[in-house]
Amino acid sequence: TPVVEVGAAVVLAEQTLAAGESAARSFTYYVGPKKYSSLHALQLHQVDVMEFGDWIKPISKLLLRVLNFIHDHVPPYNYGIAIILLTIIVRVIFWPITHKSTESMKRMQQVSPLVNAIREKYKDNPQKQQQEIMALYKEHKVNPLGGCLPMLIQIPVFFALFVVLRSAIELRFASFLWIRDLSEPENLLPGVLPFVSGLNVLPLLMALTMWLQMKLSPSAGDPAQQKMMAVMMPIMMLVFLYPYASGLALYWTTQNALMIVQQMLMRRKSAAHPLRA
């Protein structure tokens, strides 16, 4: 759709003039795309119009710079490929933390029968029960909260990329495979499907890979609760990501695929050694 008209507003600070006094004010303005490199060259905080957010602004700027660098230097100079490579870079950077966390989850799963035995043995003495469980965790070097760390790390990167894909002009009309515009939903078969404006394939792939990734993840606790979470989380992410930029779903799908590969490699390498109380 062609742009018919645009508008802008300037808010100036109030100034009181004495009788016969005059004042002049001057300012500059920029008319053009919200391209980070162009706005950054203008200085004077012009880049703030990109609305990179407050607490994630440094991460957003870094992600955009890396994304543009990959696009400009790696053939075939495609932003879809750049998003995939950026995801791989993020995974490599956080590999030590996610690997340690996955190992912690695996050990948590292994000690789960021992924990259940302690709970049964000291069911009438909650204080003793808690002491024995904590001693068991310490003996086997298990961190009950270790599995939450990868998700917490991903949240700032996820929101920063969300802001970048929303604000950066670079991805506007950038195509990848069947996707015509990575800054918009895929919107295939518009007007054909009920309840939605069009078919978005990537969010469906994202939900499927997330379900498989959660199924492969080591888990401890109530199996019924784990199964429910493995279904509810992909559905929630599907509903959240479906109407947003396809580039964001591409990032999350790639993230899930890499996590699946990591977990399959760990399963192949690790030998199952049952723990003893």
Image (cartoon, rainbow, N blue to C red):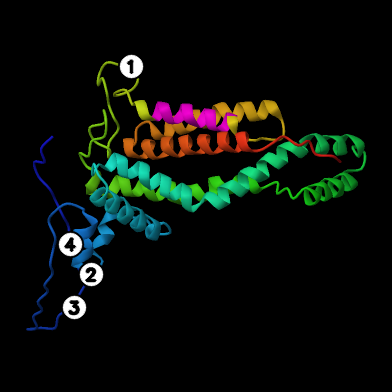
Q: Are marks 2 and 4 in contact (CB under 8 Å)?
A: no
Question: In this figure, which residue is indicated by the disc labeled 2?
Answer: 44
Q: Does 32 sit above or below residue 3?
A: below
The residue labelled by disc 4 is 10
Q: What residue type is labelled 3?
A: Thr
Say whether residue 194 is magenta: no
Sequence-wise, which precedes: disc 1 or disc 2? 2
Secondary-structure class at tag 2: loop
Magenta-highlighted residues? 203-215
**Disc 3 to disc 1, how far (Cα)?**
60 Å
Name the magenta segment's main secondary structure.
Answer: helix
* Amino acid under disc 2: Leu
Quarter-wise, where is residue 171 in the image?
top left
Evaluate whether residue 245 shows in this view: no
Quarter where residue 253 is shown: top left
Q: Residue at x 92, y 38 (%)?
A: 124
Q: Label 1: which residue?
A: 194
Of mark 4 and mark 1, the one earlier in the sequence is: 4
Dot 3: few (<14), some (14–19), or many (≥20) neighbours within 10 Å?
A: few
Mark on residue 7? none
- Magenta includes 212? yes
Look at the numbered disc 1 and give the secondary structure of its residue: loop
Quadrant (top left/top right/bottom left/bottom right) for the N terminus:
top left
Amino acid under label 4?
Val
> Which of these two is toward me, 243 or 181?
181
Residue tagged by mark 3? 16
Give coordinates of residue 58: x percent, y percent: 38, 60
Numbered disc 3: secondary structure: loop
